[in-house]
Amino acid sequence: MPNPPPPSRSAGFGLKRVSSGVLGYASGLPLLLVGSTFAFWLRESGVSVQVIGLLSWASIAYSLKFLIAPAMDAYSLGPLGRALGRRRAWIFAAQVCVAAGLAAMAFGDPAANLALAAIGCFATAAASATQDAAVDGWRVEAAGPDEQGLLVAAYQLGYRLAMLTAGAGALYLATDLGWIGAYGGMAAIMALVAALTLTIIPATDRDAARPEPTSAGSALAAPVRDLFALVAATPLTTLALIGLYRVPDQLANVMSSPLYKDLGFTNVEIANVTKIFGVALGIAGAFLGGFLLKSFSVRTVLIMGIVASATTNLFYTALSAAGHSVAMLTATISFDNVASAVAGTALIAFMSKLAASEFSATRYAVLSSIYALPGHLLAGGSGFGVAAVGYGPYFVITFLTGLPALLLCLWLPRESRASTKAAAEAAS
């Protein structure tokens, strides 16, 4: 009798790969709509760079996922959870809230009702962060360690396609239908994705095996203990590295959209260069990051990533001096997307080594919160920095913020070849 096919090639795993891609799309869609795409709309509506910087604090929600993750590891949302499974119930509920938040943003034109647009933005970010934590838990539980690389690859492909939709797609729609039509269309897409969650996303095996807790204390005690064990076992320098690694990118991203608008680039030019061309290079950069991880240690690729991603900010300084130059914009976006993708892939591999646990949603949420929070907090003052010194000097300062992360990367111990190979498989 022939041997059965390996799990990664089974029909059931094929559905999980498709599901991981769909969930990656769902996670990626809101990110730009509360970030750079929203900043385009704000600047076009005459909102100051100071206010745009402050509204970037909506992204802090992505740094607070750890607050909701223990509840996700414990509770199934009552009848909804019994019908869909714990992970799917949380994912579906969050997606419905994201769609509602985007609809509120659509009707909150910043030029006429900035307060409603801001409330919709913060609500969408909170729901999106909740969805991300639930999706992270689903992905880790949906397959064994030997199959995680394929799920992550499908997730990242879906994520990149969603950024293409929320970036270039929204800008094209805004050109033809206005921003209200663009955000209304994005809300409709998110509602469709929620419907797909009901129909094709499978429940995880662990959902069926895990009983409901008898009390809130018993529900939260185990994941919280696991969280403290993670923090206690991880050196402070490692946690600091995770927290500081993406700061140059985060500080640059908040002010890049206002820069494009102030230099006179049209929505179509921005969409073509920064979204379509940029997303394609981002996908190529992710593959490059995976190749580098197979060839070098995680430590080495982390060093490459922080040097490249910080250097990108000097391209923005050059762009601010060049003015309305599509050639310089293309060069900046080319370097930025490849460098950012390599850095992001290296950081995912680094965090993946720390996140494996029975309480995967809690662990990964905490690590991703640590990586996101410092940059998002600092980004709130980015508009005041630009107003004080101008775009050129501001991006030079953001380049220098990569130095602490570089020093912490150099501080990391060298890894064995076995650990390097495992990390590459986790990030591929």
Image: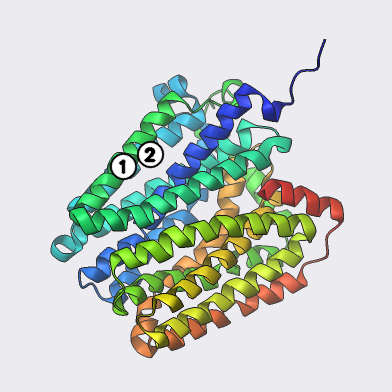
Residue 140's disc is none
Q: Where is residue 48 in the image (x, y as percent from the top left)?
A: 26, 76
Which quadrant of the structure image shows residue 41?
Answer: bottom left
Q: Is mark 1 on a helix, strand or loop?
A: helix
Colour setting = rainbow
Q: Can residue 378 be seen in this view?
A: no
Seen as rendered, the residue at the extreme top is: 1
Q: Which of 86 and 427 is in front in this view?
A: 427
Q: Nearer the viewer, residue 252 or 168?
A: 168
Question: Disc 1 marks which residue?
Answer: 99
Q: In which quarter of the image is the N terminus?
A: top right
Dot 1, how many residues are within 10 Å of its Cα: few (below 14), some (14-19), or many (20+)?
A: many
Q: Which residue is drawn at 60% across and 28% down?
A: 14
Q: Where is residue 167 in the image (x, y as percent from the top left)?
A: 37, 57
Assess whether mark 2 and mark 1 are in contact (beta carbons under 8 angstroms).
yes
Question: Disc 2 marks which residue?
Answer: 95
Q: Which of 25 and 215 is in front in this view?
A: 25
Q: Residue at x 72, y 46 (%)?
A: 425
Q: Is mark 2 on a helix, strand or loop?
A: helix
Q: Is residue 113 visible?
A: yes
Query: 71 above or below 166?
Result: above
Q: Position of residue 384 (x, y in %)?
A: 35, 81
Distance of label 1 from label 2 (alpha carbons): 6 Å
Query: 129 above or below 259?
Result: above
Name the amino acid type tagged 2.
Gln
Q: From the viewer's perspective, is 264 left or right of 351?
A: left
Q: Which residue is drawn at 40% across and 84% down?
A: 320
Q: Where is residue 245 in the image (x, y as percent from the top left)?
A: 60, 68
Dot 2, how many residues are within 10 Å of its Cα: few (below 14), some (14-19), or many (20+)?
A: many
Q: Residue at x 61, y 23 (%)?
A: 12
Which quadrant of the structure image shows residue 265?
Answer: bottom left
Name the amino acid type tagged 1.
Ala
